[in-house]
Amino acid sequence: MSVTVSTFLKMKAEGKKISMITAYDYTTARLVDESGIDSILVGDSLGNVMLGLGDTVSVTMEDMIHHGAAVARGTKNALVVVDMPFMSYQSSVYDAVVNAGRLMKEARANAVKLEGGVEVADRIRAIVDCQIPVCAHIGLTPQGINALGGFKVQGKTADSARKLLEDAHAVEEAGAFAVVLEAIPAELAERVSAELTIPTIGIGAGAGCDGQVLVNQDMLGMFHDFTPKFVRRFAEVGDVMLEAYRAYDAAVKDGSFPAAEHTYAAPAGVLENL
């Protein structure tokens, strides 16, 4: 049975943990879907891991639609959530609704995700009023990295923790069906999770959240230059891929590939009659 936003709420009520992971292409989406993971996030993190942009600020609506549609085509069961990119919703309620609609129609999303708390509650409410499910995102919000002054843990002071609690309640009241908590103290995330009736999805927010999300390439070990503290590498796929590429390169250059079993033969007499 396909996972829906109602499934998320039911899992929260029953105390069942929710699994979410990012994916950005058809092939990966099929594998994730087959694994039984509850939700796929087509994150604007694709700017970092797929496009090499270095941040999420430069990601466009066209990028999100292109990758979101590919993921949707490869998914049958998992809930597909597509990020709303920078400046697709901040400028106005109208822009937020129109762009959320595009992600549902053109990217075939099941839900959209946007960053912010109190300040975007009116956007969330308007999008939800159009029958579009919204996942909120508070704490460290990568689209606001320039204003935040870098990738820093949020909610470490009494004032910032209080603001985060206000944000959490604001997005729930606005109609969000779930909220991502990124890079906040575990104790604060646990309190937020206890106070809300909608599920919390943590990333760098401890085990007290109702679910967890990780970037695919991080948990697969496809990057070696930097690994965030909150990432657990469940495999070293990057090393396996590198070894395979090197083996392919060597086989081509030494003539061992393609071998006879990889080659088509012409039917008897064909070449003689040319």
Image: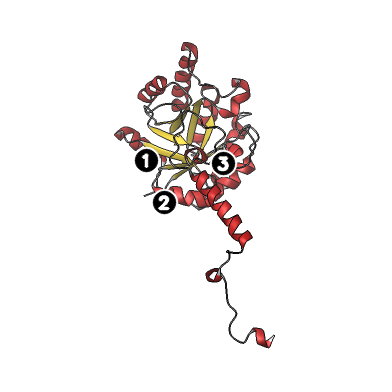
- Cα separation between marks 1 and 3: 22 Å
Q: What residue is rendered at 70% in x and 85% in y?
A: 274
Work out whether 118 lies above or below 65. Answer: above
Pointer 2 or 3: first along the chain? 2
Disc number for residue 34: 2
- Cα separation between marks 2 and 3: 28 Å
Residue at numbered disc 1: 7
Q: What residue is rendered at 37% in x and 31% in y?
A: 210
The mark tally for this picture is: 3
Residue at numbered disc 3: 101
Neighbour tally class for label 2: few under 14, some 14-19, many 20 plus, Cα within 10 Å? some
Q: Viewer-nearest of labels 2 and 1?
A: 2
Q: Is residue 85 left or right of residue 200?
A: right
Counting from the top left corner in percent of width and height, residue 20 is at 44, 39
Q: Viewer-nearest of labels 1 and 3?
A: 1
Pointer 2 or 1: first along the chain? 1
Kindly identify the amino acid type of the residue bearing the numbered disc 2.
Answer: Glu
